[in-house]
Amino acid sequence: MGIRLDNVSYGDKIKNINYEFIDGKITGVIGCSNSGKSLLSYFLSDIISDYDGNIVSTYNIRDIGYVFQRPEEAFIFETVREEIAFGIKRYNYRVDEIDDRIATVLKMVGLPLSYLDKSPFTLSSGERESLALAIILILNPKVIILDDPTINLDNYRCDKLIRLLKRLSSRYKKMIILFSSDMDFLIKVIDNYVLLKNGKVVLSGSKRDLIDNINKFKNASVDVPKIIRFIDTANKKYDVNLEYTFDIKELMKDIYRNVK
């Protein structure tokens, strides 16, 4: 078992949510603004605990790493080094061990060592997101929760994040929960999904069945991936019958078959 929500509610904002997040899987919790995404992320990370219902977990709060939608809200120190080192110093590591771990996590998130003495508040928005991820990774959490992680990322950093999350999931068996409406990002990384609308789960399943339910995402005011919009437009404009896919190579093959 991973983390199970049993009839979790919060006033009229979250309504009777039942769902189980699976160990070693990447799950996308998807919804538009005011769907309840961020609020649910606060429940899972124990930032808010006065909800109704139960969250049953095999993990304690020290096993969970959480990155805010605006990561700078959690920064409290004057340098990048202090931000990353703060959490691990309580475990009585030697200074050289701490330095090694800092270097490792900076490399993982794509920040140079030359940033260690910079103020975190002078970093770009994308670099702040990377720093926030480094801060939790140095503690080696078993569960990683990210709230709207791509909102400040350019394509380069987004691609690096995708590769890192896949590695953390496949190699280190981390449970990763992504709260986002960025479908172009999510389809590249998730194993499972949960669709929220007005605080309710309206759909859940594996990435494999997401395509069959794509119209329900439209009904929940979530922008569907660009590749799906392209297929819709091509089918209508050119009277072809391209199959829905998230794989650009498969789409190119299908286009070739239709224009031969």
Image (cartoon, rainbow, N blue to C red):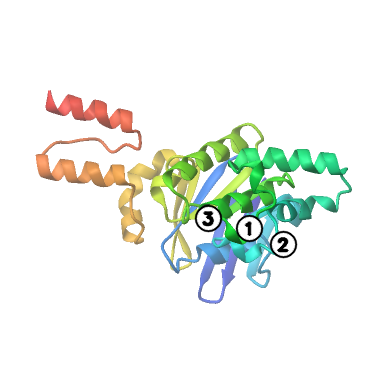
- Locate the C terminus by quadrant: top left
Q: Residue at x 48, y 40 (%)?
A: 189
- Label placed on residue 120: 1
Residue tagged 3 = 124
Other-residue count near label 2 (Cα within 10 Å), few / some / many at <14 / 14–19 / ≥20: some
Residue matched to label 2: 77
Q: Left or right: 220 with respect to 91?
A: left
Q: Residue at x 35, y 37 (%)?
A: 246
Image location (x, y in percent) of residue 104: 70, 38
User: Is the residue 110 above or below the residue 75 in the image?
Assistant: above
As helix, strand or loop, the secondary structure at mark 2 comes to loop
Foreground of the two, 162 or 85: 85
What's the CA distance linking mark 3 and mark 2? 17 Å
Q: CA distance from mark 1 to mark 2?
A: 8 Å
Q: Amino acid at mark 1?
A: Pro
What's the CA distance linking mark 3 and mark 1?
A: 9 Å
The reply to whether residue 60 is visible in this rendering is: no
The N terminus appears in which quarter of the rendering? Answer: top right
Q: Give the image quarter of residue 241.
A: top left
Marks 1 and 2: CB-CB under 8 Å?
A: yes
Local packing at callout 3 (Cα closer than 10 Å; few below 14, some 14-19, many 20+) is: few
* Residue at position x 31%, y 56% in the image: 218
